[in-house]
Image (spheres, grey):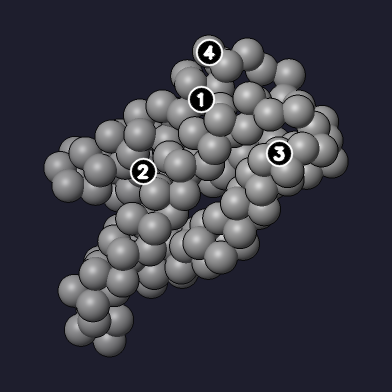
Amino acid sequence: MLSDYYHILLALHLLAVIAWMAGLLYLPRLFIYHLEFDVGSKAYITFCTMERRLLRIIMRPAIVLTFLFGILLAFSANAWPSPWFHMKLLFVLLLAAFHGFLVRIAKDYARGKLPPFSRKTLVFLNEIPFLLAIFIVFLAVLKPH
């Protein structure tokens, strides 16, 4: 029955992933710019607001929908027994853990606590979601045995 909706589920899953990835790529960049302002300044508070809204309005719904449609899609395609799917799921879970890590950093900023990372480290962290996405996309498209 779910297989009848495969293409609709795939489209909804991809749209949710795009929104989630946009947030995962943008939030670390906000953190980098955020470092330039003194705690409590108007600009600092503005960045806290931007980060909170990005997380609540875009990223939280997007991660929930990504998992919801992804799970339904996996059932509709009977992907659960496939080894490629297990690897893909592992990388998606790493991406979700990274999301949680970003939430923690945003909460620290909101409390006036700067992250214990240099600007250079934050720039590197900004690349992690895309690197994970490369593996996820190739596994989903190629479905290696």
Three-letter amino acid code of the residue under disc 1: Leu
Q: Secondary structure at mark 4?
A: helix
Q: Which residue was labeled with disc 2?
A: 88
Q: Secondary structure at mark 1?
A: helix
Q: Quadrant of the N terminus?
A: bottom left
Q: Which residue was labeled with disc 4?
A: 120
Q: Position of residue 51 (x, y in %)?
A: 61, 48
Residue 81 higher or lower than 43, as above or below:
below
Q: CA distance from mark 2 to mark 3?
A: 37 Å
Looking at marks 2 and 3 on the same chain, the residue that comes earlier in the sequence is marked by 3
Three-letter amino acid code of the residue under disc 3: Tyr
Q: Residue 97 occupies which quadrant of the picture?
A: top right
**In this view, the mark in front (1 or 3):** 3
Q: CA distance from mark 1 to mark 2?
A: 20 Å
Q: Decide if residue 28 is in sight here.
A: no
**In this view, the mark in front (3 or 4):** 3
Three-letter amino acid code of the residue under disc 4: Lys
Left or right of residue 26, residue 1 in this image: left
Q: Which residue was labeled with disc 1?
A: 125
Residue drawn at point x = 38 percent, y = 63 percent? 16
Q: Position of residue 61 (x, y in %)?
A: 53, 67
**In this view, the mark in front (1 or 4):** 4
How packed is label 1: few (under 14 Cα within 10 Å), some, or many (20 or more)?
Answer: some
Q: CA distance from mark 3 to mark 4?
A: 20 Å
Looking at marks 4 and 2 on the same chain, the residue that comes earlier in the sequence is marked by 2
Q: CA distance from mark 4 to mark 2?
A: 29 Å
**In this view, the mark in front (4 or 2):** 4
**In this view, the mark in front (2 or 3):** 3
